[in-house]
Amino acid sequence: MTDTQSASSAAKPGLAPQLGAHLVPGGTRFRAWVTTTDDVAVRVNGDTHRMAPVGDDVYEVALPVGAGARYSFVLNGQVTPDPYARFMPDGVHADAEVIDPAFTWQHADFPGVSAEACVLYELHVGTFTPEGTYRAAMAKLPYLRDLGVTAIELMPLAAFPGERGWGYDGVMLYAPFAPYGRPEDLKAFIDAAHGHGLAVLNDVVYNHFGPDGNYLHAYSDRYFTDRFHTPWGQGLDYREPHMRRLILDNARMWLQEYRFDGLRLDATHEIHDDSPTHLLRELAREVRAMRGQHLLFAEDPRNLPALVTEDELTGVWADDFHHTVRVTLTGEHEGYYAPYAGGAAAIAHVINRGWSFEGQPWPLNDEPRGAPADALGAPSFVYTLQNHDQIGNRPTGDRLHHREDVTPAQYRAASLLLLTLPMTPLLFQGQEWAASTPFQYFTDHHGELGALVSEGRRREFQHFEGFAGGDVPDPQAAATFLNSTLNWAELDEGEHARTRALYRAALGLRRSDPVLRSPSRDTLHARADGDVLIVRRADEHGTRVLVWNLGGGPVDARTHADGGEIRLHSEARDDSTLQPGEAALLAVSA
């Protein structure tokens, strides 16, 4: 089905007047909300035009220019980039481009993906391919479809300074990052993904603005507040209507104009809002009122089921699973791994409860963390073995399978567990073939800020046991970014091919097997028998049992599963013997 989205219908803002530059009959209307001065103008294609006040500190002018015109606002004589810009082709400190949002969609009838069917694949556009663009990533969509994932989660796209970065220091929330491509390239990527049956989610950062290129203060200090502070500085004042609508209308733009199928909400524990209705709840309600099926996942370490039951989000990143599995395989106990026990019993506990901490004191500050999550369905827990944080926040950006104390067999067994649980699995680019490339922390700040970032990164890890004096990759170096780019040439080589085959087989079973397809937690039970993890899923369609040998000697999977036939062995064998580190999924007769 083809659908042409017109400029007039592309976005329906919640706050009038709409700010920024927008096409109107006969030209473009420029609007700005400014409380810092009454001397407001706009410079368009080099010519400056006064803007007239229209009430409530809003200034506007309509000019006979169209899409492609370059502009900046001029506040009290100072050329100032537009924080509502829709595209910044030359970077966040330069002129914006007037954008026509019209786009002819080829797959306008794509229904989205349900939470129950969601298998997330997190990727960073800049390092997913050597080209680092939407168009290059588009060529990999058939691969992702055939792998068996159902939803792509793009790391943040809002414009940030420089030519490379993770995206979590965005400053122009409405402008997709130019080095990845133009807005129409992003729409083409999403449209093509829909054609392959893949949903696309956008990772959005609504808790802070980056330190370089944030011009909101030039327009009004009322965007910010000292009532709250975040790890990144001054808090955002969500009680201020313009700040609130800036966020809510931004979500609306991504979901309606760009037709993203959902959002990953970054660090929601740092969205501090003392309004009668919390921003997250209002955002979720506005999204639920939109046409279509949208997924909303929060990154939040607090283990709060209320994010789903009260704030109406789809689910939460439940990192306790990752931490418990990692401690089991590596024995790490530094930093935030310190509160976690390893072993089969600990993994069984987190699977049965959804997360480990349900109100117990958090050992690092002795404050209660979490609440019981009995009311949540399995898809509300996002489980992972790798994501950008758990890899990139390590000193060298090493992945779980890069560690010498994690064997390929152990890694594949952990992967089989992840992919056969009813929780929402999230994969990070390349983990499905045990990619040799790291994912390191990289930035492209200029001047003093760049030097501070480099020095701060070195200091961050100087006290880590076993890493003192180690060589932390410089985040400012181009090589750090390039080293993080996936090497697709290794896809079909040796252990890479074996691991990818397991992922494809496991995701195929997750999709086709009626027991594994069920999202129910009621039919899920995990237990430990010594060093053996046993995960049983049983309903009217049958019984499936995953057995993972975490001990030092061989075990028989059938003995621990009460019989059954091997459906999938982590080492692609048909026998039921599990050597240390191996796992198998069995179908057991009632």
Image (spheres, rainbow, N blue to C red):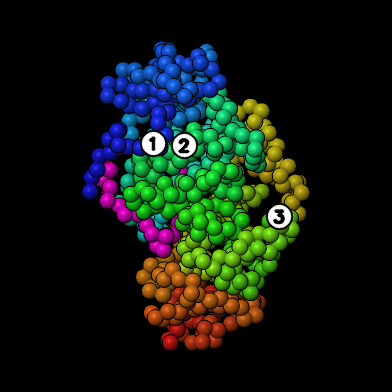
Q: Does residue 458 appear in the picture of this structure?
A: yes
The residue lying at 40 percent from left, 62 percent from top is 117
Q: For residue 204, which numbered disc appears in the image?
A: none
Q: Report the quarter where the C terminus lies.
A: bottom left
The disc labelled 2 sits on which kind of residue?
Answer: Arg
Residue positioned 37% across, 49% down in the render: 289
Taking the image as drawn, is residue 42 in sight? Answer: no
List the residue tagged with mark 1. 13
Residue at x 41% of width, y 48% of height: 287
In the image, which residues are magenta? 102-130
Q: Which residue is mark 3?
A: 335
Residue 509: x and y, percent? 40, 70
Q: What's under tag 1, amino acid-wise?
A: Pro
Which residue in the protein does label 2 denote? 245
Per the model, the C-alpha gap separating discs 2 and 1 is 8 Å
Q: Vertically, is 526 above or below 240?
A: below
| Three-letter residue code for mark 3 | Gly
Separation of disc 2 and disc 3 at Cα? 37 Å
Whole-percent x and y of residue 268?
A: 56, 48
**Mark 3: which secondary structure?**
helix
Disc with the residue nearer the chain's start (2 vs 3): 2
Q: Judge whether residue 123 is colored magenta.
A: yes
The secondary structure type at the circle numbered 2 is: helix
- Label 1 – label 3 distance at C-alpha: 43 Å
Q: Given the current orientation, which residue lies at the most extreme left position? A: 1
Which of the pair 96/50 is nearer the observer?
50
